[in-house]
Image (cartoon, helix red, strand yellow):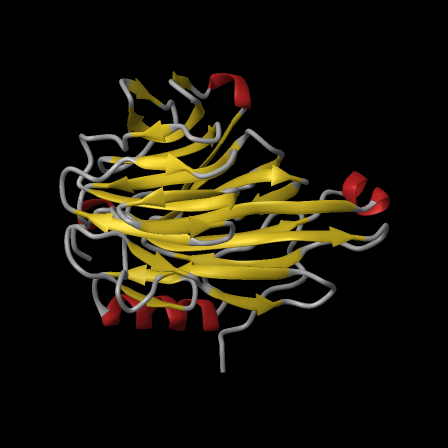
């Protein structure tokens, strides 16, 4: 990446039943933004009564995952025994470290009634010194997250630090993740303490460094200072970034590691079903890709 923002359109993957995911990171020109190595836009998907999302148990290493919803609900279970439903404004932060297994499904009430599901899910590479840390899971209710009020903009700080605020979500490296709502014409300077920046427009459009970023599109930029954003219409977007990653990472399937050997070790462990089981969701799992 260089100082000029780079527009990313992403690729849409149809998962069936009207459920699609747009993958925006990684791309060849931007393998990571701060610690963010993976960014998916989920939906919006409309599930009829009796239908829902079912991501069967699967493993992770070397990363943390964060899910942020605009609509709907997801039930998280993992091999630590965690059980937490996430809804808009709440945070599910899972640290995989040396290894964890989790599943993501539509909660029973929403499955019975039907729901619209819309949100984003991100992976953050752990610093090399923390890659083998003990796995952990934390759920944070919406009322503990800092609110930021700026001229023409209201934001919630999901994780990290920005605009003089710090989220209670435990992170492992300098970073920030916010949802911001901008009035038409509003200008917003990005947090100056961070060197790498990304924006994802949920709805509306912004001008950033001479390019227009519309709905369901991302732009990324490295170099200080970053240009300010200007909202072309009332806009909701995610802002994210942080310090440069401490070295390249290998991504294969659900694994993130600094060496291919660590990826191969995780692959063999999952093949042998040595990661552990998800409490309350023990009967299914996603096999290794062929």
- The quarter of the picture where residue 24 lies is bottom left
Residue 15 visible in the snapshot = yes
Q: Using the image as rendered, state which of residue 195 and residue 133 is in the foreground.
A: 195
Q: Is residue 146 rendered to the left or right of residue 54?
A: left
What is the total number of numbered labels drawn onto the structure image?
Answer: 0
User: Taking 34 as reference, is 93 above or below it?
Assistant: above
Q: Using the image as rendered, state which of residue 103 and residue 37 is in the foreground.
A: 37
Instruction: Give the residue at x 48% y 55%.
Output: 40
User: Taking 10 as reference, is 172 above or below it?
Assistant: above
Q: Give residue 21's position: percent from left, percent from top.
A: 56, 60
Q: Is residue 279 rendered to the left or right of residue 239?
A: right
Instruction: Give the residue at x 16% y 50%.
Output: 3
Residue 65 visible in the snapshot = no
Q: Residue furthest bottom?
A: 290
Q: Give residue 11's position: percent from left, percent from top.
A: 48, 67
Q: Give residue 210's position: percent from left, percent from top.
A: 28, 49
Q: Using the image as rendered, state which of residue 74 and residue 7 is in the foreground.
A: 7
């Amino acid at each position: 990446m260089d100082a000029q923002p780079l527009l990313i359109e992403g690729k849409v993957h149809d998962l069936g039943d009207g459920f699609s995911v747009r993958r925006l990171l990684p791309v060849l020109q931007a393998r990571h933004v701060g610690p963010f190595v993976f960014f998916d836009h989920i939906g919006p998907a409309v599930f009829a009564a009796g239908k829902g999302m079912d991501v069967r148990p699967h493993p992770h290493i070397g990363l943390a995952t964060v899910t942020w919803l605009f609509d709907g609900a997801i039930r998280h279970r993992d091999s630590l025994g965690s059980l937490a439903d996430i809804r808009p404004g709440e945070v599910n932060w899972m640290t995989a470290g040396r290894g964890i297994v989790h599943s993501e499904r539509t909660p029973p009430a929403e499955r019975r009634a039907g729901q619209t599901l819309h949100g984003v899910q991100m992976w953050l590479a752990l610093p090399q010194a923390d890659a083998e840390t003990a796995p952990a899971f934390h759920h944070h209710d919406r009322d503990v997250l800092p609110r930021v009020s700026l001229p023409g903009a209201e934001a919630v700080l999901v994780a990290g630090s920005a605009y003089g605020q710090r989220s209670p979500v435990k992170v492992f490296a300098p970073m920030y993740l916010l949802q911001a709502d901008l009035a038409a014409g509003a200008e917003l300077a990005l947090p100056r303490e961070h060197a790498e920046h990304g924006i994802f427009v949920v709805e509306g459009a912004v001008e950033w460094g001479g390019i227009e970023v519309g709905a369901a599109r991302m732009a990324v930029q490295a170099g200080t200072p970053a240009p300010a954003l200007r909202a072309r219409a009332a806009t909701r977007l995610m802002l994210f970034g942080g310090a440069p990653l401490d070295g390249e990472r290998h991504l294969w399937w659900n694994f993130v590691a600094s060496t291919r050997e660590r990826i191969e070790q995780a692959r063999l462990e999952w093949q042998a079903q040595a990661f552990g089981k998800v409490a309350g969701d023990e009967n299914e799992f996603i096999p290794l890709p062929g």
